[in-house]
Image (cartoon, rainbow, N blue to C red):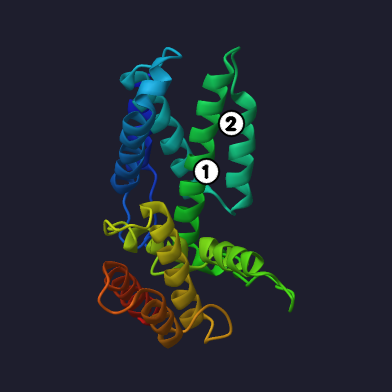
Amino acid sequence: MIKINKIMTMLFFIIPVGAGAGEVTGLDLIDRCSSYADKVVEQSGDELAQIGETPSDIRSYVKLTCIDAMRTAVLAKNVKELSQWRVAKIQSVWGFNDDRKTYQSNVINTSSKMAIEYYYSQHPDSEPAVTYPVVAPDATTDQKVSALDIYASEKKIQGSTVKNHCERLTKNVPNTDIPESTLRSEGVVACQGVMVSNVTQDKHGISFDKAMDIAKRQYGTSSKEYTFFVSVIKSANSISKQ
């Protein structure tokens, strides 16, 4: 496995990433894969140890798979080739241990997603337009929030999806009587609402002023919750207006 990793690494220095690649080098892509491998070890190492996967095994498999996906993205003539890569890799997963199959399939799917994101970053004209889901006039609040979340998961601002921006902006949740998960979830919705409002010219989402007013009426201006929401809403507004 180590020899194969070295071969794959060498290929990245041979294959040109492209003059219009936004200063992304083969080494940058390898670093992304290494970071992903480290993350898998950190988050799932204990669980995977139960099925016989050592940290070294995990890093080798994850990095090899990810680098192969990135190499495919560099050479691909269209995004369909990346989908074909994913299908072929999923079909190649073998063995009698369902947990190992699940682990390997998850790595393949994540590597495919990373490769597709890289491909679109280098071929922006080929990226499909993101449209807002159709919402019925009598839609429930849950249905409206679901539509907002779907759009936020796909629409990108400055290279990251709206959802990713909002998850980052709501990490520092204050310690209050409200459960952290609840407060963060509400913060993500408010953040997504403001960002989506800006990128759709107020056709969807929640305007900045309305979001600020809701936070004020719901929590009062002297609460920790209000301070948290104001910070999230202002940051969301700033990012989505640049």
Q: Position of residue 58 (x, y in %)?
A: 38, 24
Dot 2: element: helix
- Three-letter code for the amino acid on which mark 1 is drawn: Ser
Dot 1: element: helix
Q: Position of residue 186 (x, y in %)?
A: 44, 64
* Marks 2 and 1, the one that precedes in the sequence: 2
Q: Taking the image as drawn, is residue 20 in sight?
A: no
Q: Dots 2 and 1: beta carbons under 8 Å? A: yes
Measure the C-alpha gap from mark 2 to mark 1: 10 Å
The answer to which image quadrant residue 154 occupies is bottom right
- Three-letter code for the amino acid on which mark 2 is drawn: Lys
Residue under label 1:
112
Residue sitting nearer the eye, 203 or 31: 203
Q: Is residue 215 left or right of residue 86?
A: left
Characterize the local packing of mark 1: few (<14), some (14-19) or many (20 or more) Cα atoms within 10 angstroms.
many
Q: Taking the image as drawn, is residue 27 in sight?
A: yes
